[in-house]
Amino acid sequence: MMIDTHCHLDVSDYENVEEIISHMEGNYMIASGCNLETNKRVIELINKYDNIFGTIGVHPTEIGEDIEENLKFIKDNITNPKIVGIGEIGLDYHYDDTDKELQKKYFIEQIKIAKEFNKTLVIHSRDAVCDTYDILDKYIESNKVTLHCYGYDKGWASKFKKFNMKFGIGGVLTFKNAKKLVEVVNTINLEDMLLETDSPYLTPEPFRGKPNEPYNIIYVAKKIAEIKNVSTEKVLEITTKNAIEHFDLDI
Ligand code: NI
């Protein structure tokens, strides 16, 4: 069994999303919301498909005028038993016009919701490692935390391990220039990892350039197996167990 712990299954991204989902029969997905529209879509998906769970949240680059309405939607739906986390939330300082203070404010606000309802956090963090670490250090007590699509180095990975942390490993690992991530995978244990695709983005080799889909986590698992010198079955077995525990999945 495989679990894609982070994917986006928005209708507009795929010609036939039903078919994409059917490829995962017997496996599970966690669909992630980023804004009001996609959070609503996540609720539709978890109501429709037994093998889809969801997380809802406001992505740092999606903080807009509807932020209060969005936070209300999150609070209204967070107790749905198939909503297994808050995300994706976090910090993204990649673009020059970033309002860092605004991002930090709503990152912290959503961490507080996660704490209130004891939900796992799914964090997007790009070019913002110090602030991400400092905020987790200050605000997180016992919540489980995922750094989705982990992109920092192995030194930071060992620092982040002090939190109740799993690292989301995706298609980037299969890219030719993935040296830093290969080092991370070499350093951390299989018990620290979750498989994810971030579909429709970050398609692994050999399909790079085409839209990604949840089934492609098998290629990530194979690459991890190669690096760790274990069988792909072993990688799937341990990462599946990690995902079930980390998100309290009722499987
Ligand atoms: Ni994502």
Image (cartoon, helix red, strand yellow):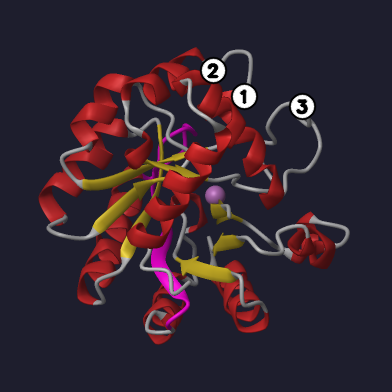
In the image, taking residue 148 as reference, residue 136 lies left or right, namely left
Q: Position of residue 196 (x, y in %)?
A: 54, 46
**Residue on which disc 1 sits:** 174
Nearer the observer, 154 or 190: 190
Q: Position of residue 88 (x, y in %)?
A: 45, 56
- Mark 2 Cα-neighbour bin, 10 Å: few <14, some 14–19, many ≥20: some
Amino acid type, label 3: Pro
In the image, taking residue 194 as reference, residue 106 lies left or right, namely left
Q: Is residue 90 magenta?
A: yes
Amino acid type, label 2: Ala
Given contact means CB atoms under 8 Å apart, are the residues at marks 2 and 1 in contact?
yes
Image quadrant for the N terminus? bottom right
- Mark 1 Cα-neighbour bin, 10 Å: few <14, some 14–19, many ≥20: many
Amino acid type, label 1: Thr
**Residue on which disc 2 sits:** 178
- Mark 3 Cα-neighbour bin, 10 Å: few <14, some 14–19, many ≥20: few
- The residue at 22%/28% (across/down) is 158
User: Residue 32: which numbered mark, if any?
Assistant: none
Which of the two labelled residues, at mark 3 and mark 2, occupies the earlier sequence position? 2
Residue furthest out toward the right = 15
In the image, taking residue 240 as reference, residue 134 lies left or right, namely left
Given contact means CB atoms under 8 Å apart, are the residues at marks 3 and 1 in contact?
no
Nearer the observer, 216 or 229: 229
SS for dot 3: loop
**Residue on which disc 3 sits:** 206
Q: Measure the alpha-carbon separation of dots 3 and 2.
A: 14 Å
- The residue at 86%/62% (across/down) is 16
